[in-house]
Amino acid sequence: MPKRGDNIRKRKDGRYEGRYADGYKPDGSIRYRSVYGKTYAEVKQKLYAAAGGNLQKDAKPVSKFLFEDICVMWLKSKRLSVKVSTFSRYKTIVENHLYRQFSGQRISQITEQSVQAFAEILMKDHKPKTVKDILILLGQILSFANDRGLCQPVSTSVKLPKEQKRRMYIFTVLQQQHLVLYLIRNLDLQRLGVLICLQTGIRLGEICGLRFEDIDFESGTIRVQRTIQRIKDENGGTRFLIDTPKTDTSMREIPVSDFLMKYLQPYRKHKKTAYVLTGTEEFTQPRTYQNRFKRYLRECGLPEANFHTLRHTFASRAVELGFDVKSLSEILGHANVNITLNRYVHSSIEQKRKQMELLSAAI
């Protein structure tokens, strides 16, 4: 077995072989060369000589590759293995954060101390969750380099302050009733979309991507199988991406209540390939729909709220009504039940009061 970071292995013929990076191939991948010897120490000596370094105890591998070179290779390796939206997010983090800090540095010069210093800089302007995501990506890139013998293992594990949970805003029962009444009294396709979200918990990008072919009027179900989002393009601008939802569990079938189906039925004659929000084959942009939703709130006298409040309200109300958590998790498209439990299964003050009254009644 090779020792980690040395790229040396024992061959079947008894000799040792060491591999080192020596420039690029025409396709942009790393070109490797090998050295051989009778002993591990001999090959290790040859490896350092080939790399232009001197053998010293615990010396780091010498690499001519700059950090940005490795980022380019890592991104290239990811392009076909992750979703387009995920790749776009990776590229944004690399260009907006990692290049700013490590551009121009040799990959072998990056240490745990420099990672710690980077984390401290990030913490000044970003939330712990954002910093964590950036460091995870940095860790993947450094592991990619280490696996190819271009640097020693570098830990990106940094202790971050615990992010204080923000109180989740949801509509009260009265506010929800008021909003529903406003929607059905002024019902059109755009307001119907808000009603669908309030009754099913589907996300902003998912309602923008919903077509009439996704609604089964016979079985009374909605299939969530696409989402629309804006991502960065190769030219530094942005474009809209119509894609499958972010995880396999987000691809789901949701039963529709009789109440909601009553308001869906009048629109069933629309062309199947038409988007629900427009009735045509042109979609509504998520940001445009978010702004329209806020206008609806103003029109019916409710406080301003994010579009995601509809999803939070649906989930929280479902818990209050005693939904089975596993079923609710699948309806919401969560990756696992724990997300649903941690985010929504908590007692409201009204629920706590009811429980306390049960205790009083027993005395």
Image: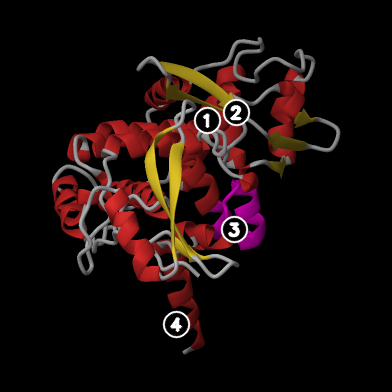
Q: Which residues are magenta?
A: 317-335
Which residue is under mark 2? 243
Name the N-terminal-most of marks 3 and 1: 1
How many numbered discs? 4
Name the N-terminal-most of marks 2 and 1: 1
Relative to the observer, which residue lies in front, 263 or 328? 328
Nearer the camera: disc 4 or disc 3: 3
Q: CA distance from mark 1 to mark 4?
A: 57 Å
**What's under tag 2, amino acid-wise?**
Asp
Disc 4 + disc 3, Cβ < 8 Å: no
**What's under tag 1, amino acid-wise?**
Val
Disc 3 + disc 1, Cβ < 8 Å: no
* Image disc number at residue 360: 4
Which residue appears at 24% of the width and 48% of the height? Answer: 52
Secondary structure state at the residue bearing disc 2: strand
**What's under tag 4, amino acid-wise?**
Ser
Q: Is residue 324 visible?
A: no
Name the N-terminal-most of marks 2 and 4: 2
Secondary structure state at the residue bearing disc 3: loop
Relative to the observer, which residue lies in front, 275 or 297? 275
